[in-house]
Amino acid sequence: MTMHPPSTSSRKLTFYLAIALILIGIDVFYLHQLSYFQQTHLAVIFFDIGLFVLLVLLSFFGKRIIMRRQDFISESLERYKSLFDNHPDSIISFSLDGEILSANHGLESLLGFCPETSKSPSFLPMIHPPDLVKTLHHFQVASTGMPQNFEASFLHQNGQPIPSNVTFVPTIVGSEIVGVYAILKDLTEIREQKKEIDKLYKQNQLILNSVSEGIYGIDTNGRTIFWNKAAESITGWKVDEMLGRRIHNLIRPAQQDGSFVPIEESSTVSTMLQREGSIVNEDLFWKKDGTSFPVEYMSSPMLEGSGQLLGTVITFSDITELKKTQELLIKSDKLSAVGQLAAGVAHEIRNPLTALKGFLKLLHTSSAKEQYYVEIMQKELQRIEFIVNEFLFVSKPQATHFVTRTLYTIVMSTVELLQPQALLGNIEIDAEVDSGLPPVTCDEHQIKQVFINIMKNALESMTQGGTLHIQAELNGPGDQITVRFIDQGCGIAPERLPKLGEPFYSTKEKGTGLGLMVCYRIIEAHGGFMNIRSKLEEGTIVEITLPTTTYSAKGAATG
């Protein structure tokens, strides 16, 4: 509360009152010094004079005080009237019975009613009927002394409902509640702005969710502020699980003890929060299930108009398939190089090889020792011839004769062929192949060559015996058949699996790596694909998927 210094009139009143009191005091003093008669006569004189002066002063300054109080009240009323009339919101004064006592000019701009003509016995006709009960309830609560704030619609003079924010404040005079003030604020523009914001937000979300790349945003503290559908599907993290959380779950900058590196010390986050943005061609992100995947991402800064950094938008894509494609291209380049090399080598080797084999047959000897040496040379020449034939298959396309056959027939004939080798190794071959599977269009001899190669590898890996399982099943709508060979052999180390099928790479001591490469080439030529999974000391699973005749016919018709 502000304390004002005493006014000039108050100081004057105090001064003159002091003089009157001094005169009365002098009167009392002299009365003690005079005789009874003198005291009585002089007392009357001084007392009358002092009393007269006192009454004159009180009368004069009393009027001045009353006039100043009236001026103060008048000024306060003008201030209140200025606030009431010029306030941008609509202000209405109600009695406790709901009668409109007064209203400012804001009511005219809000509802089209002029303050001078808007006085009516009740405000009930002004309320939109669906909000009538709610408004009356809040009015009654405000009448008990508790301010209320809520939303309701009031009817414009033209009958249109106007959504408003309503505040009911009790009118208190002294300690008694004599009425209620209503303050109405038009929500039409605010709601239109909200609708526009919601519309822009939905459009923004549609754009974000229609993009196939994962997109998310982080603030300067590394906390996620938005997360699109593609990011959900790629990482497995839902938007509700990521919003407001730091992105350690995704980028996993972990220390040796397994704890996360602080955001401010993370080089990945530092790269993302650069003002100029950046492109990272390859990095690792982590999924919710704990597996990692290679990504390519681009970070773009979010800047205010003043240039202040608000955060970063990161667009990333899973490049797992891209890396597989690159590896296939590298393997294809190697195959092409091997093919060119094989053409020359095979040509240069076959001629002298034929001569060696021919002259070796002419060498007849009666010495057992010499005959033993001849047989060794014949076996080695046969191995050279086998390798040359594999080179020739790689170097140029072989003449294929596609016919319709069932995989059941090819598998069972292959099993019958390798059954003796399996029995020698104490291995059981369990073939679960349905004879009713759809036929495939293939070169029977080439497919049989693939099956023989895979089964021989499986039998040779099972040095301690066991069971070789062969399964066949339809995939999807029945347009593909997968043949699965499951052995219980020694398995293949994880670091060797990606190199299988490359020329001159083999897990066998004397292998050339050409056999498995030839299998890949044959399956690809038949429109299928081959996949190998393995674990050390547990075994290997080789899956071969080929199109059925129905799918092949559809493809030919489309082509």
Image (cartoon, rainbow, N blue to C red):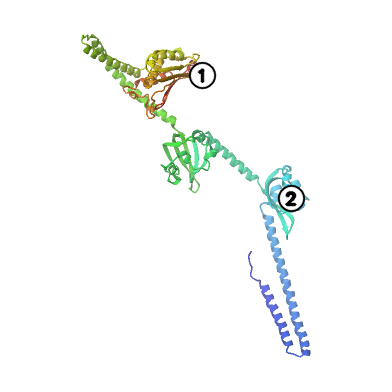
Judged left or right of residue 284, residue 185 is: right
Q: Say which of 394 and 260 sits in front.
A: 260
**Of the residues shown, which amino acid type is indicated by label 2?**
Gln
User: The residue tagged with tag 2: helix, strand or loop?
Assistant: helix
Query: Where's the N terminus, which quadrant?
Result: bottom right
Q: Position of residue 71 (x, y in %)?
A: 70, 66
The residue carrying mark 1 is 478
Residue 192 image point, x, y percent: 63, 43
The x, y position of residue 116, in whole percent, is 75, 53
Q: Nearer the viewer, residue 124 or 339?
A: 339
Q: Residue furthest bottom?
A: 35
Q: Is residue 48 left or right of residue 491?
A: right
Q: Quadrant of residue 7?
A: bottom right
Q: Amino acid at mark 1?
A: Gly
- How many numbered markers are drawn? 2
Snapshot quadrant of residue 323: top left
Residue assigned mark 2: 140
Specify whether residue 195 is in view: yes
Q: Position of residue 304 (x, y in %)?
A: 50, 46
Q: Is residue 443 visible?
A: no
- For marks 2 and 1, the one nearer the N-term is 2
For the residue carrying disc 1, how many other residues have a C-alpha within 10 Å: few (<14), some (14-19), or many (20+)? Answer: some
Q: Is residue 400 above or below residue 129?
A: above
Mark 2 to mark 1: distance in Å?
Answer: 73 Å
Identify the residue shown where x is 64% and y is 68%.
4
